[in-house]
Amino acid sequence: MNHTILLLIEHEENRNLLSQWLAGQYRVLLPEAKCDFANRGEQLLTQPFDLCFVDFSSIQQLRQQILARRKKAVPVFLPFVFLTNLQNIGISTDHLESVIDDVIHIPVAKIELQTKLRVLMRSRSDSLQLQQAKEEVDRALSQEKELNRLKSHFVSVVSHEFRNPLNSISGMAQILKTYGDKLTPEKKVEVFEQLQRNVTKMTDLLEDVLVVSRKDLDKFEFKTAPLELPAFCQSLIREIQTVFDREIQINFVYRAERRQFDLDRHLIERILSNLLTNACKYSPPDSVVEFQVYCQASEVVFVIGDRGIGIPAEDLDNLFEPFYRASNSHQVRGTGLGLSIVKQCVDLHQGKINVESKLGEGTTFTISFPC
Ligand code: ADP
């Protein structure tokens, strides 16, 4: 009984008889006895139904509302059936054609009524299915459009971000080629370090691109193994410090009693290195980044706090969307990919991530994993 029939029949006897006939097979909506028919009819027309019976009286009183309801249903077929005892009335009368789809003359044999209803309901179901299929195609199309938009955005952001370290590498190579013999040993070390930093930047960016596309391909893996956390964090800090061409102070505090945890080394590395790099990137040159690790209940918790530019409150909700950058971050280079990767990795590791930030004062990311 998944179809609903509305009986906008003012003649009470006809209405009750029809309701009894239909009740076994359909859900029936009808105005209660002795109600204000026009008012109640108008309300009932706003409810969901699959077919509606009307008579002369309801067409007279509710013509505009019926027309509006029919218009609203388009392009889905919502049949309105005219019930009449006048044998010479057909659908082709001017004022009827726009309001109804079929006529049933009473008295009518029950079997004939049922067959007619089945036919009309079949057309209704077909048109509903078509509409659903159309909606699915529309949805797929808009997803496809969004994907294409993201892809072109992705290509433009990534190629833009590659250009800078590449230019720098090319400049350094030129210096070595032209002045290689005349450079002091200290200057040579400086040039090589800068080369190394730019290569690391490009490798990191490539890694981000790979992570994002691997996710697209559903090939992201989660494999835990014992990880010696203090040594792992310290080596990560050293690596991050080499990427920046200025002194970076990261204050590392390890407060957990255990030193070894079952974690996915690759995922944790991506998470922490993105968060630590951001903390340094979005802070003034002389400021200190706090990095703490502790255990709480059955969780290992990482806290990374900075006293940098902070994040505007209105940007916090979208921070983990790919390519999203907060409105105050435009002086700092970036792709907006890091935090979306962080979120994917945290989810995959069944962890939680939380961000607290005050504009102009600083940002703290807290991540926890079951252990
Ligand atoms: P990006 O490459 O732009 O740094 P992320 O995905 O890592 O991309 O970060 C998204 C945005 O979140 C950044 O553009 C920045 O606006 C904001 N953000 C992230 N971390 C911080 C932070 N520690 N301090 C201030 N803003 C931050």
Image (tube, grey):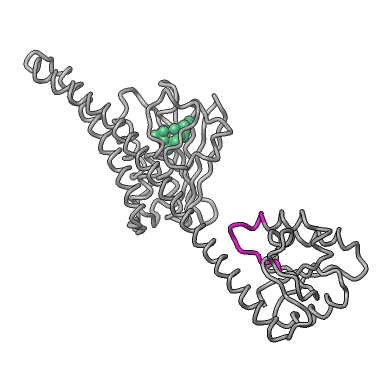
83 sits to left or right of 326: right
Measured from the top left, where is residue 98 in percent x and y?
Answer: 69, 58
Whether residue 358 can be seen here:
yes
> What residue sits 8% from the left and 13% below the top?
182
- Camera-side residue: 133 or 67? 67
Measured from the top left, where is residue 6 in percent x and y?
Answer: 75, 69
> What residue sits 53% from the left and 43% below the top?
354
Quarter of the image with the N terminus in it: bottom right
Up the image or down, 337 lies above or below 331; here it is below
> What residue sits 10% from the left and 15% below the top?
179
Whether residue 290 can be seen here:
no
Question: Most extreme residue toward the right, as rendered?
Answer: 34
> What residue sits 56% from the left and 65% below the top?
127
Measured from the top left, where is residue 234 in percent x and y?
Answer: 35, 39
Q: Quadrant of residue 226?
A: bottom left
- Camera-side residue: 202 or 91? 91
Question: Most extreme residue toward the left, as rendered?
Answer: 181
Inspect the magenta stretch and tell me whether residue 77 lies in it: yes
Measured from the top left, where is residue 224 in percent x and y?
Answer: 36, 58
Q: Quadrant of residue 104?
A: bottom right
Up the image or down, 273 lies above or below 80; here it is above
Question: Most extreme residue toward the top, as rendered?
Answer: 182
Inspect the magenta stretch and tell me whether residue 63 lies in it: no
Up the image or down, 107 lies above or below 340; here it is below
149 sits to left or right of 66: left
- Camera-side residue: 106 or 279? 106
The residue stretch that appears in magenta? 71-81
